[in-house]
Image: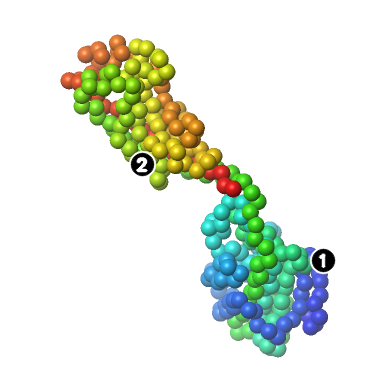
Amino acid sequence: MAIGDVTQGDQHGVLRSTSEAPPAHYILNIQQFSSLTKHDVGRYESSEFEAGGYKWKLVVHPNGNKSKKVGEFLSVYLAMAEPTSLPPGWEVYATFRIFLLDQNNDNYLKLEDAMSKGRRFHRLRTEWGFDRFIDLKEFSDSSNGYLLEDDCVFGAEVFVCKERSKGKTECLSMVKDAVAFKNTWKISSYTKIMNTDSESSNIFIVGGDHKWKIKLYPNGKKNIGNYITLNLALADPASLPSGTKILVEFTLRIYWFSASKPEWGWNRFITHGTFFQTNRGLLYRDVCSIEAEVAIHGETTVYG
């Protein structure tokens, strides 16, 4: 395919041209290109480079992007290097050009998107580019200068044209294979707390930086007589960002914890009669032990 100095378009909305000027932001030289295919490297990612205040990388599929069923073409993309560093809901609009050096004529084949307003990069779409960057036969033909002595050179230019937030965004992060954490609270003189409204265990941490405590109501919560109430509670619910909810499994039940619902448990956990029976062993020589087993399965955070 002959490429003139005048920009040309194709049926896929891609502008192709030649340029004597090298790419302004990044150059990727791949030596022994055939080794990528030999060792079944379906996707090669370059090192990071910075442009427009963000970090990027080039992504090359030596035999086409198989996930898009592309064959007989070289696929090349621009990708955000650190998309998870973006706040949820944050978008970056960027125009970009990807280059391939013609080593015979010392100029570059240059592909750019016909979308003048730029492509939208965000957490869920981190990569844009060209599925059919160049035909592999054309690329491999030494007379075209793109692959000489198994050596080729790519390049990139990236220009950020707009950044914005989509407003309020909710992000639910589920935890795969959550690990349960056990905490035991030993009450050494139960009779000293029998007439108090409630008692709390020492604070313990589960799920990164979330602080918890066990709450015991010796005479029941919410005017429930003749019962002991036992709850798991967030130790500092006011510190949670607005809208945050935490999905927690403790013992046999699952609940959402939030600032508006900082504790869950059983109002009628056990009757006084059962608890104080000496043959039960729940209270022995004025000592009882309470154990909480806690596993965090997910967290919802609202941004904006």
Pointer 1 or 2: first along the chain: 1
Q: Using the image as rendered, state which of residue 195 and residue 72 is in the foreground.
A: 195
In the rendered image, the vertical position of residue 83 relative to residue 7, given as above or below: above
Tell me what residue is drawn at x 59 percent, y 44 percent. Answer: 170
How many numbered tags mark residues here? Answer: 2
Occupied quadrant, residue 114: bottom right
Tell me what residue is drawn at x 74 percent, y 68 percent. Answer: 113
In the rendered image, the vertical position of residue 141 relative to residue 64, given as above or below: below
The residue labelled by disc 2 is 205
Residue farthest along the left direction in this orientation: 285
Q: Is residue 142 left or right of residue 288?
A: right
Task: Judge whether residue 102 can be spotted in this image.
Answer: no
Q: CA distance from mark 1 to mark 2?
A: 57 Å
Occupied quadrant, residue 233: top left
Label 1 sits on a secondary structure element that is: loop
Crowdedness near tag 2: few (<14), some (14–19) or many (≥20) residues, C-alpha within 10 Å: some
Q: Using the image as rendered, state which of residue 224 and residue 98 is in the foreground.
A: 224
Q: Which of the numbered marks, if any, corresponds to residue 11?
A: 1
- Please tell me whether mark 1 or mark 2 is closer to you in this view: 2
* Colour basis: rainbow
In the rendered image, the vertical position of residue 221 relative to residue 248, given as above or below: above
Image quarter (top left, top right, bottom left or bottom right) of the N terminus: bottom right
Q: Amino acid at mark 2?
A: Ile
Q: Is residue 196 left or right of residue 10?
A: left
Tell me what residue is drawn at x 77 percent, y 72 percent. Answer: 15
Q: Is residue 129 left or right of residue 234?
A: right
Occupied quadrant, residue 117: bottom right
Q: Amino acid at mark 1?
A: Gln
